[in-house]
């Protein structure tokens, strides 16, 4: 049983929505954010990446960054860039990328469902990143970015959504990256109740993207409960902002790896060690090699692409985590050969979302004339849900979802 709650969204005026909406804070660095927001006072990056309005040498976790985020959010409210709906609604959010559509419900989900593992996780979080978002939520008194959730397809929910989107949307624009964003307001009480009731029959939600935002929102909610010991459970701080898509709509793309050096090995020594666990073939085709099946990898080394195939016995086919391609590569190559013990913290490894293309891997290796890159076959939604259901976690950087949800379209105030 999943608890969904309608809420009074704080959201942009329709005439400037395209100027407000931005990609999530965690897909860009401060320099990139500053360039994107340059000359655009409406950009939501002034809230989500507020350091762009401060001295460029400021520590990203400095208290002033969060104070500035709150000031900028309040300024957008005062100037009517963002206006809060007068009644509690649900919302429908559709993204279309390369002709593929995904349609989800925008609602508030329960921190208790998260605590009780009705909202399931598949990644560990880092304390520093959690604390950053805790501070951001706390100072802004709002969830400014939605958690990206998924659920196993339900035809009854789909039918309600399909019927409602025949109506006129409140937003309909194409962002600079070519992704079409469309939003409808579900303001009919009967329909809202129907959707919420249908989600009571959904066993679990799964975090697709936004583990740090979710964990932080929950911890802020728990802190508010401590500050308000007579809380009823209906207060806004008991819920956090989410966009919930059926799993059949979602698209995981490859999340590739670059290692900056060969851990002191010569090319020949390295290749001999790789051969112990992988079959190696030279890629005869033109251009980068994109894996077409599980347990198959592209490897770019010294200006050439190779095809790696994991040998039998290098992984447990019955273990949902060990049989992941990212686990096989980590356990048989990145750790024992290249010395990458913890890919979350080792600065010798970088991760490149497939949205950047495989030529980016070539460029990064050729630029330094050293290191090795790996192209990966994408993790599947079924893998993600199986691991979450088993109470396990994936290795870091296992999934990359596209398109990314825009921030600034919906803000959930905690009061």
Image (cartoon, grey):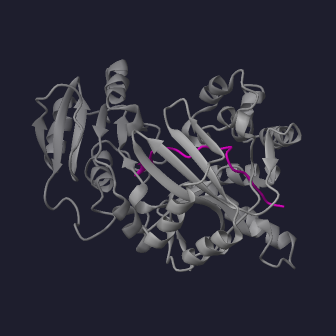
Describe residue 253's horizontal placement relative to residue 16 as left or right.
Answer: left
Q: Position of residue 321 (x, y in %)?
A: 34, 64
Image quarter for residue 200? bottom right
Percent coordinates x, y for residue 341 in the rendering: 39, 50
Residue 303 sits above or below residue 147 on the image: above
Quadrant hosting residue 32 = top right
Asked if the stretch drawn in magenta spans residue 407, the answer is yes
* Up-down relation of residue 126 to residue 99 (above or below): below
Question: What x and y, as percent, mark residue 408?
Answer: 68, 43
Decide which of 379, 324 is in the foreground and name it: 379
Query: Is residue 392 in sight in this rendering?
Result: yes
State which quarter of the image contains the C terminus.
Answer: bottom right
The magenta segment: 397-415
Judged left or right of residue 313, residue 55 is right
The residue located at (46%, 52%) in the rendering is: 102
In the foreground, 402 or 88 = 88
């Amino acid at each position: 049983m999943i608890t969904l709650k309608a809420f009074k969204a704080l959201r942009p005026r329709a005439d400037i929505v395209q100027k407000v909406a931005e990609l999530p804070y965690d897909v860009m660095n401060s320099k990139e954010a500053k360039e994107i927001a340059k000359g655009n006072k409406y950009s939501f990056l002034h809230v989500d990446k507020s350091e762009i309005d401060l001295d460029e040498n400021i520590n990203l976790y400095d208290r002033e960054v969060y104070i500035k985020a709150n000031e900028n959010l309040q300024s957008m409210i005062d100037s009517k860039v963002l206006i809060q709906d007068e009644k509690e609604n649900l919302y429908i959010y559709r993204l279309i990328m390369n002709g593929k559509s995904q349609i989800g419900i925008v609602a508030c989900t329960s921190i208790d469902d998260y605590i009780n593992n009705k909202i399931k996780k598949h990644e560990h979080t880092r304390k520093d990143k959690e604390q950053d978002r805790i501070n951001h939520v706390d100072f802004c008194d709002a969830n400014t970015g939605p958690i990206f959730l998924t659920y196993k397809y339900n035809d009854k929910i789909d039918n309600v959504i399909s019927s409602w989107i025949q109506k006129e949307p409140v937003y309909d624009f194409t962002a600079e990256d070519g992704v079409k964003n469309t939003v409808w307001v579900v303001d009919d009480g009967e329909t809202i109740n129907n959707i919420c009731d249908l989600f009571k029959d959904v066993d679990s939600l799964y975090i697709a993207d936004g583990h740090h935002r979710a964990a932080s929102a929950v911890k802020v909610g728990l802190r508010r409960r401590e500050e308000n010991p007579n809380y009823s459970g209906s207060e806004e701080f008991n819920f956090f902002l989410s966009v919930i898509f059926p799993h059949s709509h979602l698209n995981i793309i490859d999340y590739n790896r670059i290692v900056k050096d060969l851990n002191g090995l010569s090319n020949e020594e390295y290749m001999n060690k790789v051969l112990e666990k992988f079959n190696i073939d030279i890629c005869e085709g033109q251009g980068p090699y994109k894996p077409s099946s599980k347990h198959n990898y592209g490897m770019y080394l010294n200006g050439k692409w190779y095809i790696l195939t994991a040998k039998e016995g290098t992984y447990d086919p019955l273990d949902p985590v060990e049989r992941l391609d990212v686990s096989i590569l980590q356990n048989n190559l990145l750790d024992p050969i290249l010395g990458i013990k913890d890919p979350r913290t080792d600065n010798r490894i970088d991760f490149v979302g497939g949205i950047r293309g495989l030529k980016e891997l070539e460029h990064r290796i050729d630029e330094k004339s050293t290191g090795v890159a790996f192209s990966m076959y994408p993790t599947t939604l079924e893998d993600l849900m199986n691991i979450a259901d088993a109470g396990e976690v994936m290795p870091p950087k296992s999934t990359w979802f596209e398109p990314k949800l825009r921030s600034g379209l919906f803000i959930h105030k905690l009061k």
